[in-house]
Image (tube, coloured by chain):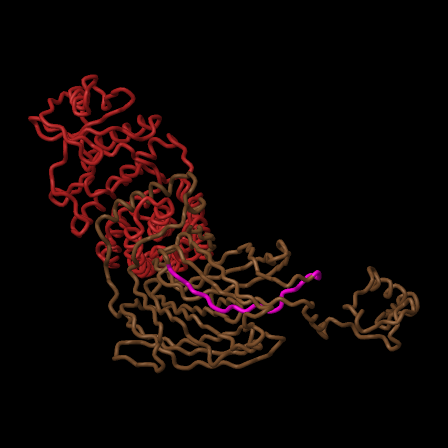
Chain colours: A red, B brown
């Protein structure tokens, strides 16, 4: 019976790699070879969509998008190595500075790289129209989740306050619920069913710090093969939600990043509404409530996170209100 | 030999706002609660709670029940935070954000819709909370920077068993923070009744007996720091002879426990109740062939002993008087009596005595029958006749 490292060494050998050392790093294996570090990762998405994902990846590399590294070939000239029921892919670890959300230059570099990648993705979609028909669930999901929150709040209000989480939750529920309602309102204005569905592209999806490197003001993404598809503003909203909060939802910075994105991918009014909606929806408030209900984490930890989130949402609300006016004026 | 104490599991009562009244024999407890949400400011410090005024007046009286109402005015001070944190976003939120987006797009059943699990007993609270057993009588306006929350709490309640003895007593007051900018004030008010009954008749003698009851009460899921009070309401008495040497009295008792909870909840003054089927023996030695009745019941003494964080032992001494004649029937209230006809006779020509009078109740369909009779005789004056002329 082979150990995990031995099995990975065998898989690495299929990519012509002689492993000196193998370390597991947040879901991927870092294989040290004589030529440098190589990352090896298991594909965890839908297998039926793997071919489409690879084809998209190929297209990016063929068209000179270097924001994603080249995938290594296997001995059978493929990009994927099958081992048992698992599928692996490998790439050379990007050399550069680790991404930091606090660094404004890094934010600019990522938005710029993302915008270029998205503009390629739009061309790709035009070439390969209707390869995958997907039902975008976001507008339905948003309303369903808001309904869940409302149900939970009523259930909580009927009982005695049991802990600090419940106190903070109930105290701020009206404000948060209004944020959700405003997000729904913006989705309606965006008219997603009509305006957005035909503009779905492959998205970067993951903006975790360990998946991004910055070198000479250029951002590089890890080759996350699970490129989900959706409206392009979903990526932009996701990235801004992750990192603009670290800058106190600075309006000037947020607007600058959106304008930078628009230099490569101009957004129509419907997309702007959708962007504002995605940025406003209190997804983490819903997540923490779920974690509290499931008793996944301690009450004190969740209360602390909830309080921080309330402060952040207040700042975000202020920023998004002004951003709404600025984006409308641009039209 | 040590007898095992009867254990009763009480049910925690949901604290309600703005008031909660618990009636008992000789005592009425009123819990007043109110919340105040400070607009646009976080609370950084809690100040003092002081009583500015308290008044009460008798509204009405019925038998041995007295209805009182009044108002308590309090002042609570707090310090608002003028500089709330501008940025509290930590780097780790990226992972939560990623997780939230992933879970949101999942169409599986949301845990928020699921049923609640067992009552959670959590640790300490990050929000301050203060209890006052003797709140100061004058509002102490603190240094600058403190804001005052003026509280007015009107109350009303029946007092059973006698007139109010003196003034309503503030047993405990609680000022707490229940959120970033929400204050909670709770007041426990006690209305003691003065002993208006004939003292002589209620002393243990030939017909009055001192009965001792003892039980242990358990409040599940709660930590009791202090038991403040208790009331008992008894009903459904049944007396039976027991071997010609004693009487066996069966009754139901609804016991209320008023206590201070120690967990992190917003409300600290809590109540729990339980229904107990009781059976006690009264050493009744007068061998009478006729059945006897229960006269007066007086709660002589209640001792509350907190045994553990969830358990209280209640020792009660009660004086019960036995009467050989039935207690006098209460007069039928005037509102229940229908007006008498002029000749005091019913349809069958029988005389109606005042004792037989019951509330007037029309026969089924009588209302409609009357209408039908009337409508056949005369045309309704409200009927309108409209004439339309067609000219050629």
Residue A17 occupies which quadrant of the picture? Answer: top left
- Seen from the viewer's position, the closer of residues A68 and A82 is A82
- Seen from the viewer's position, the closer of residues B17 and B30 is B30
**Vertical comparison of A238 with B289: above or below:** above
**Vertical comparison of A89 with A330: above or below:** above
**Vertical comparison of B171 with B272: above or below:** below
Rendered location of residue B247, percent (x, y): 61, 58
**Vertical comparison of B27 with A115: above or below:** below
**What secondary structure predominates along the stretch shown in magenta?**
strand
State the quadrant of the C terminus of chain B: bottom right
- Seen from the viewer's position, the closer of residues A288 and A199 is A288
Q: Kindly identify the residue that appears in the image at 17 percent across and 52 percent down.
A: A102
In the displayed orientation, state which residue is furthest to the left: A34
Residue range (magenta): B289-306
Relative side of B22 to A59, left or right: right
Rendered location of residue B301, percent (x, y): 47, 68
Report if residue B300 lies within the magenta region: yes
The mark total stands at 0
Q: Kindly identify the residue that appears in the image at 38 percent across and 60 percent down.
A: B306
Rendered location of residue A172, percent (x, y): 37, 59
């Amino acid at each position: 019976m082979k150990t995990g490292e031995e099995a990975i060494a065998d898989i690495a050998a299929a990519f012509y790699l002689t492993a000196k050392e193998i370390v597991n790093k947040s879901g991927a294996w870092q294989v040290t070879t004589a030529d440098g570090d190589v990352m090896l990762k298991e594909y965890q998405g839908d297998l039926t969509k793997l071919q489409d994902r690879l084809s998209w990846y190929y297209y990016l590399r063929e068209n000179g998008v270097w924001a994603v590294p080249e995938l290594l070939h296997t001995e059978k000239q493929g990009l994927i190595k099958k081992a048992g029921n698992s599928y692996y892919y490998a790439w050379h670890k990007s050399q550069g500075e680790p991404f930091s959300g606090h660094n404004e230059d890094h934010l600019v570099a990522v938005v710029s790289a993302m915008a270029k990648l998205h503009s390629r993705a739009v061309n790709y979609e035009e070439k390969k129209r209707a390869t995958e028909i997907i039902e975008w669930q976001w507008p339905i999901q948003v309303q369903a989740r808001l309904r869940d929150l409302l149900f939970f709040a009523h259930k909580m209000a009927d009982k005695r306050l049991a802990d600090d989480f419940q106190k903070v939750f109930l105290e701020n529920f009206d404000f948060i619920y209004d944020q959700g309602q405003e997000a729904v309102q913006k989705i309606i204005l965006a008219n997603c069913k009509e305006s957005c569905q035909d503009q779905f592209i492959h998205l970067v999806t993951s903006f975790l710090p360990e998946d991004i490197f910055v070198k000479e003001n250029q951002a590089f993404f890890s080759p996350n093969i699970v490129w989900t598809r959706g409206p392009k503003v979903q990526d932009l909203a996701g990235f801004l939600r992750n990192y603009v909060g670290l800058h106190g939802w600075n309006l000037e910075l947020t607007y600058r990043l959106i304008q930078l994105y628009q230099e490569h991918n101009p957004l129509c009014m419907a997309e702007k509404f959708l962007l504002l909606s995605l940025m406003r929806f209190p997804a983490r408030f819903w997540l923490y409530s779920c974690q509290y209900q499931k008793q996944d984490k301690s009450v004190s930890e969740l209360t602390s996170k909830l309080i921080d989130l309330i402060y952040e949402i207040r700042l975000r609300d202020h920023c998004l209100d002004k951003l709404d006016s600025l984006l409308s004026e641009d039209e | 030999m040590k007898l095992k104490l009867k254990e009763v599991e009480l049910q925690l009562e949901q604290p309600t706002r703005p008031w909660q009244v618990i009636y008992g024999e000789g005592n009425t407890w009123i819990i007043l609660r109110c919340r105040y949400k400070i607009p646009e400011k976080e609370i950084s410090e809690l100040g003092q709670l002081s009583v500015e005024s308290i008044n009460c007046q008798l509204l009405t009286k019925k038998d041995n029940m007295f209805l009182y109402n009044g108002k308590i005015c309090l002042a609570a001070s707090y310090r608002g935070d003028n500089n709330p944190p501008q940025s509290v976003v930590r780097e780790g939120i990226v992972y939560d954000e990623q997780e939230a987006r992933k879970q949101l797009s999942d169409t599986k059943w949301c845990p928020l819709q699921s049923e609640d699990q067992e009552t959670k007993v959590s640790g300490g609270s990050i929000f301050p909370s203060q209890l006052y057993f003797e709140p100061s009588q004058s509002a102490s306006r603190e240094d600058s920077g403190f804001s005052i929350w003026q509280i007015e709490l009107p109350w009303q309640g029946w007092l059973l068993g006698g007139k109010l003895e003196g003034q309503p007593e503030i047993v405990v007051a609680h000022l707490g923070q229940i959120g970033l900018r929400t204050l909670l004030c709770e007041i426990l008010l006690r209305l003691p009744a003065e002993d208006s009954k004939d003292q002589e008749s209620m002393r243990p003698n030939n017909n009055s007996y001192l009965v001792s009851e003892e039980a242990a009460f358990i409040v599940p899921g709660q930590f009791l720091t202090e038991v403040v009070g208790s009331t008992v309401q008894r009903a459904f008495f049944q007396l039976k002879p027991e071997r010609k040497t004693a009487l066996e009295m069966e009754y139901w008792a609804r016991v209320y426990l008023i206590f201070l909870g120690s967990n992190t909840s917003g409300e600290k003054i809590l109540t729990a109740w339980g229904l107990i089927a009781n059976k006690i023996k009264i050493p009744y030695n007068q061998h009478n062939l006729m059945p006897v009745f229960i006269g007066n019941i007086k709660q002589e003494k209640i001792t509350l002993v907190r045994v553990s964080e969830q358990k209280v032992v209640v020792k009660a001494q009660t004086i019960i008087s036995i009467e050989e004649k039935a207690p006098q029937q209460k007069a039928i209230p005037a509102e229940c009596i229908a007006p008498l006809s002029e000749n005091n006779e019913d349809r069958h020509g029988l005389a109606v005595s005042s004792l037989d009078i019951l509330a007037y109740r029309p026969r089924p369909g009588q209302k409609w029958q009357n209408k039908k009779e009337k409508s056949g005789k005369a045309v309704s004056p409200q009927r309108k006749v409209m004439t339309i002329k067609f000219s050629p």
